Image (spheres, rainbow, N blue to C red):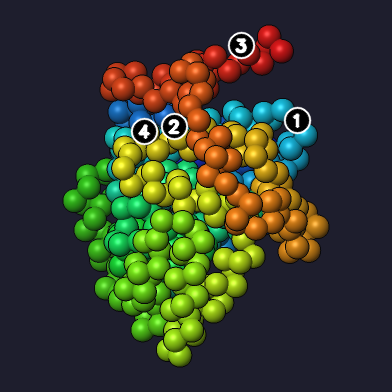
Amino acid sequence: MAHGLVNLGEQVLIAEEVNHVRLLTLNRPRQLNVISREMLSLITKNLEKWEKDDHAELILIKGAGRAFSAGGDLKMFYDGKTIEDSCLEVAYRMYWLCYHQFAYKKTRVAFVHGICMGGGASLTVPAEFSVVTDKTVFAMPEASIGFYTDCSFTYILPRLPGYLGEYLALTGARLNGKELIATGLATHFVPSEKFPELEQRLINLNSGDKNAVKSVIEEFSVDVQPDKDSMLHKQSIIDKCFCKDSVEEIIKSFETEGSIVENEWIGPVLKGLRRSSPTGLKIALRSIREGRKQTLPECLKREFRVTVNILRAKISGDIYDGIRALTIDKDNSPKWNPPTLDKVSSEKVDLLFQSFKEELELQIPAKEECRWEGKYENTAYPSLKEAA
């Protein structure tokens, strides 16, 4: 049984090869396995290599420690705020990788133990088998720091029942393992103490046959239902409020529902909404609404434009003060600019969604045989950097 270790330096990613099985371990446990520039590059290289390798059949993905992944490395974005387009390449590679998660040809099993947020979840939801536990916590809290739900989730969330997608994107509400199963964002629930045994059984299976992999997972999985106080039992209220056309209307409708005695759960959610970036909320809502009508490639191309423009602080620098307040100074007191929803006009938000020149768009090859050719290196961006 041969094991190959990739990246012997910081070991932000451990890639092992065991016969026909390939294992990826996100290995920044102290940082909750947030995805760094280096980790992103290594994930992409290994997944591409293994998909082209006839000997590789089954890919297992997990996170070290108490998180699968808390998403992108916010400090990386904050540190690059004064350097023009310092994270443009990271954004490009991330969305390009998101596309390949849906088109990937080898069988994958994601072990979603602990925290799974933002970009981290883009490695789990598209997998054929996404296995969650009693310790799993999923959320898309980006609007609270002046950003928005991205990494293919403007495609995924609008396809959840009713207007649950809007609710998750705007409120950053958390889902546990049982709720992920109920919404279809995960495929199997396995008690956390059984994860090591399940992993070993899949390694011993030594096959990517989907039916065989499913049978093994089902030996360990249990049937679950959302707890009685789950937000999923509040779907009618969520749909009634979050179907509205604007963030202002959504909040007003939610406030009305919150005034009813049995709806006391709404109060804390409203408090969080009011603390979030007004700009982030408006971007998030528009992104989810556009995603309802768009294909996956269209969503990812739009996400790339919007993200690059946000990082360029085209209409607001909220993302940088949001990160500062959360992870740098940790004062939890961001200074939003503009400070209120009424100051964030539709015309301003429009500026973030404008198309780039064709050669500067995210390149997602339409032809199957060219699927891996849309890399950052093959675009106009590197030559533009050299010219500068």
Q: Which of 332 and 309 lies nearest the eye of the viewer?
A: 309
Q: What residue does disc 2 label?
A: 301
Q: Which mark is residue 178?
A: none
Q: Which of 71 and 193 lies nearest the eye of the viewer?
A: 71
Q: Amino acid at mark 1?
A: Ile
Q: Amino acid at mark 2?
A: Lys
Q: Name which residue lies at 68% across and 11% down.
A: 386
Marked residue nearer the N-terminal end (3 or 4): 4
Q: Amino acid at mark 3?
A: Ser
Q: Which mark is residue 297?
A: 4
User: Tag 1, which secondary structure?
Assistant: loop
Say above or below: 88 vs 27.
above
Marked residue nearer the N-terminal end (1 or 2): 1
Q: Amino acid at mark 4?
A: Pro
Marked residue nearer the N-terminal end (1 or 3): 1
User: Tag 3, which secondary structure?
Assistant: helix
Quadrant in which the C terminus appears = top right
Q: Name which residue lies at 67% across and 28% down.
A: 85
Q: What residue does disc 3 label?
A: 383
